[in-house]
Image (cartoon, coloured by chain):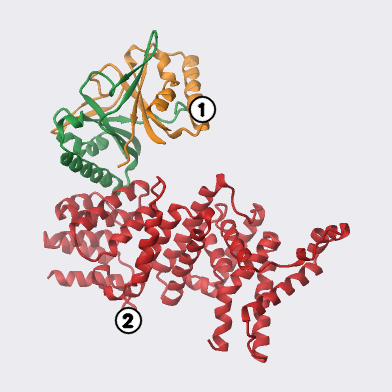
């Protein structure tokens, strides 16, 4: 069993504004997915959602610009940590993530134990 | 007190660093995180390996899995920690101490943790 | 051992065994009864043995008397009516039901089960420690009051309320199930460690009591290690850590009862037996894939048994504190980490880090700053030592700081 970091990204500028009902429905999908992982004893850390449109980027020589990190269109929206026996299993888990249904994606990274 | 995620990005470590440099970088990172923890500002966090990432993309035709960390950009996520700070400016000051910034082209993204609203 | 020493000695070792077995048998409803019977047994012993000779096997004598008193109690009370009479009517009562089992196996099992029952999250930790000392360690109320620097009334009240709570919550005296055991073990380990710390760090002047507290904590942890169900890595780590610390017990105080700082300790007074036991359990703790704070503290304690001032020692200690602070922050760990940083990375970096700590109510903080500035900036060193002097409370602490100030000039 290893720990895997799941990083959720989506292009916030391209997302249509959700109605309150849609937002609530999406919230429920996330909660159900996370709860499901927990029930299967696969969840290590629920993680966090990040505020989507604010942030800073610090570069060498104390250069600070406004964030989020925007070398690419998709910004990080949140992350979680799961456990799985292999990358293959972690990917299978990631395929169930609700962000995929709104054009987002999930990066899967194995966590090294320092 | 708010919580902020500090997301470290660097070029593929294998290409630019020798094993000794990686060792040094690891010690510096542990010392940096230890310093934050000593001020009672550390919440959670992790280091990551330099290679072997997979990405799941959603495409119209279904889900596609590609190898490698996300995106066509050179920089990959090298670590993610969550700290406590009174403001984004204070969080930025912590970020400035991160050893990853010794490498040109590397960066630390500072993002505020969204208040718990059931999404997570 | 002569007559006058024997009873208190036996009280310390056998009282808790008898109470555990009876408590387990009667349940928390009857915990006072269990304690009464046990106390009564010793009263009878002290009367009988002062009139006659000490019996050839005093422990067996005590157990026999305790068993008989318990049986009498069962006969005389509702326990008989509600618990045993129904069985008697059916004729299904075996003679053994009335027996109190004081075999070594049952004594051990009962004590372990009592440990889990007492170290329960529903009662405050001071109460857990108090009850542990009373029931698991056979301490007198006076002794417990002395250890906590309080009075008998306070302790009695505390124990009374704790027992009430355990009764209310209907805490069962049994081994927790596989699913629960890790979580419950956490509480037990916290209590054991607090018990140890009371002895190790307490300001009570009574050195004998303090040593007893430490060794009782070690004994309880040993019981957990010797039992298959509870022999987990973090239990071994805690035991290792306590052995390492305890090895320096005799060196920490000089013949006038004044504390001796680590750097100035006479290493000949360090107990090599305890150090090797610490190393033994540290090895055993290195299994599984979870690193608990006990693992980290034990590893740090191991390095502290190596007196030589090598770069390797301090680099290791620094990294261990880096990890420990992530697992659990404490001002003590923050200060110790900064000290290790000064040895591993140099004083300048440590000074920068220390200034960020802002532990402005802590005299140890200013002592550390004073140490770090010594040899770098004498004025700043003096300023910080003076701040420390203002904040220090005990005479010993003030003396130690004054010594440092004197060395500066």
Q: Is residue C94 left or right of residue B60?
A: right
The crowd level at tag 1 (other Cα within 10 Å; few <14, some 14-19, many 20+) is few
Residue shown at the point (45%, 21%) measured from the top left: A96
**Pointer 1 residue:** A36
**Nearest-to-viewer mark from 1 and 2:** 1
Gap between marks 1 and 2, in whole Å? 64 Å
Image spot of residue C402 (x, y percent): 22, 71
Residue shown at the point (26%, 29%) measured from the top left: B51
Residue shown at the point (23%, 18%) measured from the top left: B72
Q: Colour of chain A?
A: orange
Q: Is residue B21 left or right of residue C395?
A: left
Pointers 1 and 2 in contact (CB under 8 A)? no
User: Which of the 4 quarters of the picture holds residue B7?
Assistant: top left
In the displayed structure, C372 sits above or below A33; it is below
Q: Colour of chain B?
A: green
Q: Residue furthest top?
A: B61
Q: Quadrant of the C terminus of chain C?
A: bottom left
Residue shown at the point (33%, 29%) measured from the top left: A109
**Pointer 2 residue:** C256
Image spot of residue C18 (x, y percent): 64, 70
Query: Which chain is rendered red in the image?
Result: C
The crowd level at tag 2 (other Cα within 10 Å; few <14, some 14-19, many 20+) is few
Secondary structure of the residue carrying numbered label 1? helix
């Amino acid at each position: 069993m290893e720990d895997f970091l799941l990083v959720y990204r989506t292009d916030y500028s391209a997302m249509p504004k959700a109605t309150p009902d849609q937002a609530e429905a999406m919230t429920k999908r996330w909660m159900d997915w996370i709860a499901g992982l927990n029930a299967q004893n696969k969840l290590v850390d629920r993680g966090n959602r990040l505020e989507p449109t604010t942030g800073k980027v610090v570069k060498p020589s104390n250069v600070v610009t406004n964030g989020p990190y925007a070398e690419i269109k998709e910004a990080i929206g949140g992350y979680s940590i799961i456990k799985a026996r292999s990358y293959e299993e972690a990917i299978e888990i990631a395929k169930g993530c609700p962000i995929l249904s709104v054009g987002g994606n999930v990066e899967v990274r194995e966590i090294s134990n320092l | 007190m708010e919580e902020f995620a500090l997301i470290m990005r660097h070029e593929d470590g294998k290409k630019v660093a020798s094993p000794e440099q990686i060792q040094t970088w690891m010690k510096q990172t542990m010392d940096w995180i230890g310093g934050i923890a000593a001020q009672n500002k550390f919440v959670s966090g992790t280091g990551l390996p330099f290679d072997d990432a997979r990405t799941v993309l959603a495409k119209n035709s279904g889900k596609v899995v590609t190898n490698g960390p996300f995106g066509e950009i050179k920089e990959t996520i090298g670590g993610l920690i969550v700290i406590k700070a009174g403001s984004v400016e204070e969080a930025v000051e912590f970020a400035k101490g991160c050893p990853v910034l010794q490498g040109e082209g590397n960066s630390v993204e500072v993002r505020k943790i969204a208040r718990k609203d059931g999404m997570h | 051992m002569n007559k006058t020493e024997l009873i208190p000695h036996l009280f310390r070792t056998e009282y808790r065994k008898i109470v555990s077995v009876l408590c387990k048998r009667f349940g928390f409803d009857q915990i006072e009864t269990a304690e009464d019977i046990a106390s009564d047994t010793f009263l009878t012993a002290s009367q009988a043995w002062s009139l006659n000779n000490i019996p050839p096997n005093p422990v067996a004598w005590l157990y026999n008397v305790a068993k008989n008193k318990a049986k009498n109690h069962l006969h005389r009370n509702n326990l008989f009516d509600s618990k045993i009479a129904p069985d008697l009517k059916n004729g299904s009562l075996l003679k053994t039901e009335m027996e109190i089992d004081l075999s070594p196996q049952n004594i051990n099992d009962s004590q372990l089960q009592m440990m889990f029952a007492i170290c329960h999250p529903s009662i405050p930790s001071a109460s857990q420690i108090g009850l542990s000392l009373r029931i698991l360690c056979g301490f007198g109320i006076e002794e417990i009051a002395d250890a906590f620097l309080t009075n008998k009334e306070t302790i009695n009240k505390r124990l009374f309320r704790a027992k009430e709570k355990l009764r209310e919550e209907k805490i069962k005296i049994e081994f927790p199930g596989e699913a629960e055991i890790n979580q419950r073990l956490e509480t037990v380990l916290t209590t054991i460690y607090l018990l140890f710390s009371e002895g190790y760090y307490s300001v009570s002047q009574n050195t004998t009591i303090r040593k007893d507290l430490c060794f009782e904590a070690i004994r309880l942890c040993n019981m957990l290690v010797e039992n298959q169900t509870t022999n987990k890595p973090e239990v071994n780590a805690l035991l290792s850590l306590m052995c390492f610390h305890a090895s320096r017990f005799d060196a920490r105080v000089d013949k006038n009862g004044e504390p001796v700082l680590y750097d100035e300790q006479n290493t000949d007074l360090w107990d090599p037996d305890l150090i090797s036991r610490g190393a033994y359990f540290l090895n055993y703790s290195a299994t599984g894939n979870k690193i608990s704070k006990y693992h980290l503290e034990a590893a740090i304690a191991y390095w502290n048994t190596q007196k030589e001032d090598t770069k390797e020692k301090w680099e290791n200690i620094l990294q261990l504190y880096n990890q420990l602070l992530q697992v659990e922050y404490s001002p003590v760990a923050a200060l110790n980490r900064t000290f290790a940083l000064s040895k591993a990375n140099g004083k300048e970096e440590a000074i920068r880090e220390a200034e960020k700590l802002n532990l402005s109510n802590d005299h140890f903080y200013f002592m550390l700053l004073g140490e770090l500035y010594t040899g770098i900036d004498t004025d700043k060193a003096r300023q910080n030592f003076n701040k420390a002097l203002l904040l220090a409370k005990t005479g010993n602490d003030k003396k130690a700081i004054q010594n440092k100030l004197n060395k500066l000039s």
